[in-house]
Image (cartoon, grey):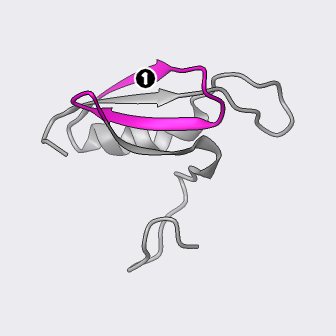
Amino acid sequence: MPKKAVVTIRYGPYSAVGLAVEHRTFRLEGLQAVLKKDGHEVVLEKIEDWDVVELVVNGEVVFHCNIKDLEFGKKPRRNQSPGVQ
């Protein structure tokens, strides 16, 4: 990713712990913090696709996943690949 990029986080609504489906940013807080710490500008954009999060840089989707799979806030163990528990 380019240095000091404008990163758009596009996120859809999801249900959390049986609550109504709506747009929530709780699971995005860690991602935003990491991107800002690395010098990127972060823009949040709501989309209507349920359970989706996408990172867009220079108009191109560079990452996407189910928003419920994001577990920022947990400290990774050393030498651990992303997503491995």
Residue 61 drawn above or below residue 59: below
Find the magenta span and give its range.
42-60
Q: Which residue is mark 1?
A: 44
- Kindly indicate the quadrant of the structure image that contains residue 23: top right
Identity of the amino acid at label 1?
Leu
- Disc 1 is placed on an element classified as strand
Give the residue drawn at x 56%, y 49%.
70
Give the residue drawn at x 42%, y 73%.
81
- Kindly indicate the quadrant of the structure image that contains residue 5: top left
Query: Which quadrant: the C terminus?
Result: bottom right
Q: Is residue 53 magenta?
A: yes
Give residue 16's position: percent from left, percent from top: 76, 36
> Is most of the magenta stretch helix, strand or loop?
strand
Residue 78 drawn above or below residue 64: below
> In screen coordinates, is 78 left or right of 23?
left
Q: Residue furthest bottom?
A: 79
Mark 1 closeness class: few <14, some 14–19, many ≥20 residues within 10 Å: some
> In screen coordinates, is 26 left or right of 6?
right
Give the residue drawn at x 49%, y 64%.
75
**How many labels, in total?**
1
Q: Residue furthest right?
A: 18
Give the residue drawn at x 21%, y 30%.
58
> In screen coordinates, is 40 left or right of 84?
left
Give residue 46's position: percent from left, percent from top: 52, 19
Residue 44 drawn above or below residue 83: above
Q: Is residue 25 magenta?
A: no
Give residue 33's position: percent from left, percent from top: 38, 40
